[in-house]
């Protein structure tokens, strides 16, 4: 398995958000939602990851994050999106920039 690891950004009772890292570089973002008997995840990764990398990453999510939480689940569903990162946007500053501030 490639050297993927996860840096938690936030956690609620039913969800978690992570930055996906590989060799100290961000390569994606992961949102996990724990529902009744099903774990739903959205995985956004950079363009350079291969299909094998994505499968390794999904395996790591299952083993290191979902199983580690200890939730009873019958299924894990992962939606994968691949592309380039446009940055992080926030609605904190509503003056002078159309309501969104780009953070990079």
Image (tube, rainbow, N blue to C red):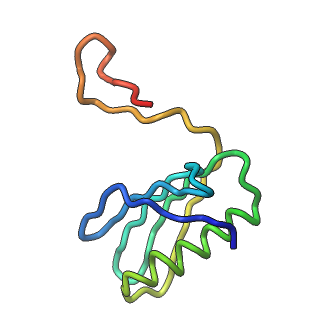
Whether 44 is drawn above or below 53: the answer is above
**In the orientation shown, which residue stands out farthest toward the front?**
24
Left or right of 49: which side holds 26?
A: left
Pick the residue in front: 55 or 34. Answer: 55
The x and y percentages for residue 73 are 43, 86
Q: Quadrant of the N terminus?
A: bottom right
The x and y percentages for residue 24 are 57, 53
Left or right of 45: which side holds 36?
A: left
When asked about the image quadrant of residue 21, the answer is bottom right
Whether 48 is drawn above or below 88: the answer is below
**In the orientation shown, which residue stands out farthest toward the top?**
96
When asked about the image quadrant of residue 17, the answer is bottom left
Rendered residue at 47%/54% (across/down): 19
Left or right of 8: which side holds 79?
A: right
Whether 50 is drawn above or below 1: the answer is above
Q: Quadrant of the C terminus?
A: top left
Rendered residue at 64%/47% (across/down): 46
The x and y percentages for residue 86 are 54, 33
Rendered residue at 38%/89% (across/down): 72
Marks counted in the figure total 0
Rendered residue at 42%/35% (across/down): 88
Left or right of 28: which side holds 70?
A: left
């Amino acid at each position: 398995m490639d050297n993927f690891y996860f840096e938690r950004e936030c956690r609620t009772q039913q969800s978690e958000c992570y930055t996906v890292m590989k060799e100290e570089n961000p390569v994606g973002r992961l949102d996990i939602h724990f529902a009744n008997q099903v774990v739903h995840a959205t995985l956004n990764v950079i363009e350079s990851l291969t299909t094998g990398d994505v499968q390794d990453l999904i395996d790591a999510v299952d083993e290191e994050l979902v199983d580690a939480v200890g939730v009873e689940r019958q299924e894990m569903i992962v939606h994968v999106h691949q592309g380039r990162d446009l940055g992080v946007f926030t609605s904190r500053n509503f003056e002078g920039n159309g309501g969104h501030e780009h953070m990079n």
